[in-house]
Amino acid sequence: MDTQVLHHGLCWAGSLGLANFLLERHTKRNPKGALARQVKNRFFDMPVHTYVVATSGQAFLQPTLWLLAYLTRDTSKAWWFGIQQQWYVGEFLAHSFGYFLQDAASHWDQSPLVLLHHVASSLAAYVLARGACWQGFLLTMAQIGELGSLSVQLYDLGFVSRRLARVALLWSSALPIAFSAAALLFGGEQIDRPDVPSGCMLALVLVMGIMRIRETPNLADDSTMLGLCHPVISTNGDLHLPDPECSSRPMSKRLGAATICVEASKRSSAQPDAKLHAVVVFSAACLGLL
């Protein structure tokens, strides 16, 4: 399966990278089109065309591959905590490997946390394909996490509310940690203990889950998310306009937003080097163990 992930993953990287290239070229030729619009005062704050490839995979391809893998599993053998050589599982991992690889390469100017997520996730897809157990469980945890990421991107595009995106990101990060801990603590002798690849992935579930939870307040990192009722300039120099919903909130919920905005900006600007260092160390450790 690792061969499928590597070879098909490179094909996915090339095709998805080409799709991103064509979308970017289209927006340059049509600078006033909908795809060229710059998302502002949200979470990722990228041009609309950069969301197309990611949301398509998260909303349609990955859930479909996960569902087909689950429905076509051999019920006489372990799936959740074992391993089955399924084409759908391999293609799920290959798509993840290719997508994260090409997105990190083509959008290197993204935030350190996003780059950290992409590098670690691309490596994780390949490592998981080499594991001998826990494959169905870890695949499911990855799918849960992707649904949380999808909700944030849909919020950026205006399809879901800020509150829904924040709740989805929080729970899609916390649940994999809770499920992993429960399986390790209460699984007993009924399930295989993790091998080195699956153990690395469980560690990644913990690390990335905690980091995503810590990023959840950043869904309230500007005036639109915090509910400011007056313009504010944050410490990074961005102008944040008033929240159109603030008039419907009690006055007590409108206070202190400016302070939160400034502090959140300080936190996010103070940690990128540590995050990048963490992914380098983790990646090197996983490769060394393999």
Image (tube, helix red, strand yellow):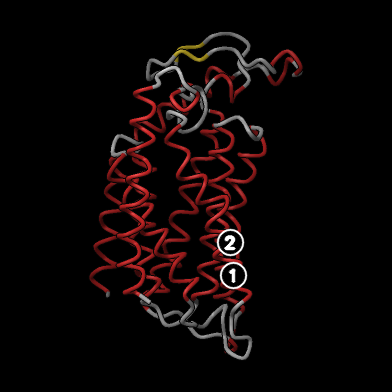
State the image coordinates of residue 184 (x, y, percent, origin top left). Answer: 54, 75
Left or right for 189, reference 22? right
The disc labelled 1 sits on which kind of residue? Leu
Viewer-side residue, 111 vs 100: 100
Q: Is residue 6 above or below residue 240?
A: below
State the image coordinates of residue 253 (x, y, percent, origin top left). Answer: 70, 21
Viewer-side residue, 156 vs 265: 156
Residue 103 visible (yes or no) = yes
Tell me what residue is drawn at x 39 percent, y 64 percent.
94
Q: Which residue is mark 2?
A: 64
Element assignment for label 1: helix
Q: Are marks 1 and 2 in contact (CB under 8 Å)?
A: yes
- Tag of residue 68: 1
Viewer-side residue, 29 vs 175: 29
Single out the residue that lies furthest toward the top.
230
Tell me what residue is drawn at x 42 percent, y 74 percent.
198
The disc labelled 2 sits on which kind of residue? Thr
- Quick one: quadrant of the N terminus? bottom left
State the image coordinates of residue 259 (x, y, percent, origin top left). Answer: 52, 19
Q: Is residue 10 above or below residue 76?
A: above
- Tag of residue 109: none
- Quick one: quadrant of the C terminus? bottom left
State the image coordinates of residue 6 (x, y, percent, origin top left). Answer: 31, 67
Q: Is residue 282 above or below residue 23?
A: below
